[in-house]
């Protein structure tokens, strides 16, 4: 895995200084790709000041309107969270996260997603991540500054990706993994199909889609497998008298 294929995604950051400090933390560790989802104030002099030498990452930063857009093309997505959530979602520490990242194929893109200073990430945003990552802290004071959290995650990524261990030791010897956008399309199709066949009641969805997302995220679908599943969904929709083309 190449460090340059790791993108850091900052969601709705309020303070431009934090964006600059995060860019500096990234560059120190050899990460290059910064994505900003609806930043409150950017570009901003404070961001450049705090980047102190990492302004190249700021100028190259990709600004997106939605988290979904920022994850386009990513095969593995981690959401950093200060709080342990009420939703049960697969959870790792930064070292385990870095190990998964380093085991990815050299060409794969992965994303580390960080939340707002005051409110973190929403449950809906975490559901777009394969894993939640929590940096172990003093349980009574667990929220790190945003750039400090980026620093810890980027450091672990560097250690894992630059270790002497043989490269290319992919955990995923099969075909190419489906990307976050392909998965998002699949989840939409799945939801519509199980409504069409009468399995999901849209007026009372409960946690069904969340549970299904968790199941499929855990299995790390390949493109080919995802196409097979979509084929099955389309066939089921046709049988149920729907178009099967969604
Ligand atoms: N008050 C917020 C904390 C936000 S801190 C909350 O309760 O969620 C800003 C961001 O930094 C978080 O969304 C998360 O991405 C990251 N962060 C801060 N502390 C962290 C920790 N201990 N583990 C993982 N990420 C953390």
Image: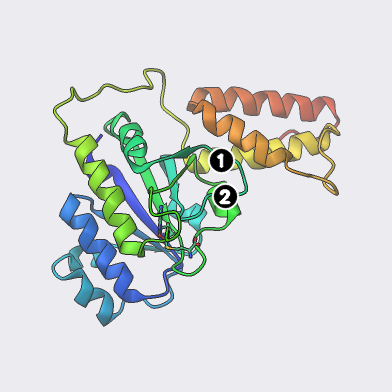
Query: In the image shown, does 238 or 62 lie closer to the viewer?
Result: 62
Location of residue 226 in the rendering, given as x and y in whole percent from the top left corner = 56, 28
The secondary element bearing badge 2 is classed as loop
Please name whichever residue, 8 or 163, is drawn nearer the observer in this view of the structure. 163
Q: How many marks?
A: 2
Residue at x 33% of width, y 30% of height: 104
CB atoms at circles 1 and 2 under 8 Å apart? Answer: yes
Q: Residues within 10 Å of mark 1 (few under 14, many from 20)?
A: many
Residue behind mark 2? 85
- Residue 169 in sight: yes
Number of other residues with Cα within 10 Å of mark 2, as a class: few under 14, some 14 to 19, many 20 or more:
few
Q: Which mark lies nearer to you, 1 or 2?
A: 2
Taking depth in this image into account, of 59 and 214 the one nearest to the observer is: 214
Could you say which disc has been placed on residue 134 in the image? none
Image quarter of the N terminus:
top left
Q: Which residue is mark 1?
A: 89
From the image, which quarter does the C terminus lie in?
Answer: top right
Q: Residue at x 18, y 64 (%)?
A: 56
């Amino acid at each position: 895995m190449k460090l340059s294929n790791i993108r850091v995604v900052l969601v709705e950051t309020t303070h431009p200084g934090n964006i600059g400090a995060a860019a500096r933390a990234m560059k120190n560790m050899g990460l290059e790709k910064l994505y900003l989802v609806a930043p409150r104030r950017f570009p901003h002099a404070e961001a450049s000041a705090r980047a102190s030498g990492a302004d190249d990452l700021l100028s190259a930063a990709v600004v997106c309107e939605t988290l979904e857009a920022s994850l386009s093309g990513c095969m593995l997505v981690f959401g950093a969270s200060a709080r342990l959530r009420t939703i049960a979602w697969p959870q790792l520490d930064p070292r385990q996260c870095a190990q998964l990242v380093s085991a990815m194929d050299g060409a794969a893109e992965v994303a580390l997603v960080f939340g707002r200073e005051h409110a973190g990430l929403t449950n809906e945003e975490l559901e777009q991540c394969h894993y939640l990552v929590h940096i172990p802290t003093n349980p009574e004071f667990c929220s790190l500054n945003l750039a400090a959290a980026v620093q810890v995650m980027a450091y672990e990524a560097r250690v894992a990706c630059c270790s002497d261990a043989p490269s290319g030791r992919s955990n995923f010897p099969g075909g190419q993994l489906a990307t976050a956008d392909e998965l998002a399309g699949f989840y939409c199709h799945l939801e519509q199909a199980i409504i069409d066949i009468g399995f999901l009641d849209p007026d009372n969805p409960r946690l069904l889609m969340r549970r299904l997302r968790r199941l499929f995220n855990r299995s790390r679908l390949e493109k080919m497998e995802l196409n097979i599943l979509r084929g099955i969904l389309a066939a089921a929709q046709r049988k149920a008298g729907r178009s099967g083309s969604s």
